[in-house]
Amino acid sequence: SRRNSLFITFSVIRIIGPFRDKRRMSMPSELIQSRDFPSVVLQSEKPVLVDFFASWCGPCKSLSPIIDELADEMGDSVRICKIDVDKNRDMANKYGIMSVPTIMLFRGGKPVKSMAGLRKKEELRGFLES
């Protein structure tokens, strides 16, 4: 009986927990398409971090909530976007994306640096701030 009540409590926490976290996040990253890229990324006055990802990619799925947390924490100091390379192959080709996830930082409409692979939030923050 005590074991059942612990199981029920744990199950409720597992169900409710994710919803609470999603409501708390106020600045999630934005999903963009090729047609949005010039206005959202290239013409932005602030730095833009672009996450080139694929929906089938395991490391991309793991990186997604980290990117969203970073977007929430960084607020208005940087714009954080995601672009699906399978749906926007022209952007992947234009910027030489060979593997996913690839993170690319744009300043003044130009790519200034990039890195590939799953990274910790602290690494991404350092990447943005350096």
Image (cartoon, rainbow, N blue to C red):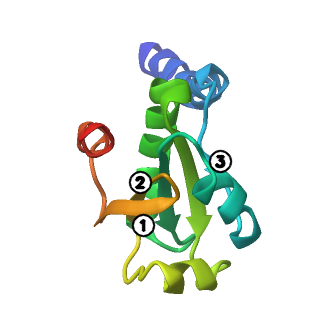
The residue tagged 2 is: 62
Horizontal side of residue 88 vs 119, given as left or right: right
How many numbered marks have been drawn onto this rendered protein structure? 3
Tag 1 and tag 3, C-beta contact below 8 Å: no
The residue tagged 3 is: 30
Secondary structure under badge 3? strand
State which mark lies toward you, 2 or 3.
Answer: 3
Report if residue 103 is visible in the image: no
Q: Earlier in the sequence, mark 2 or mark 3?
A: 3
Residue 17 location (% of width, % of height): 56, 25
Alpha carbon separation for disc pair 2 and 3? 17 Å
Residue 129 location (% of width, % of height): 29, 37
Compared to residue 111, the image places residue 45 above or below, namely above
Secondary structure under badge 2? helix
Q: Quadrant of the C terminus?
A: top left
Q: Badge 3 local density, few (<14 within 10 Å), some, or many (20+)?
A: some
Amino acid tagged 1: Gly
Compared to residue 73, the image places residue 53 above or below, namely below
Tag 2 and tag 1, C-beta contact below 8 Å: yes
Residue ID at (37%, 79%): 99
Q: Earlier in the sequence, mark 1 or mark 3?
A: 3
The residue tagged 1 is: 58
Alpha carbon separation for disc pair 1 and 3? 20 Å
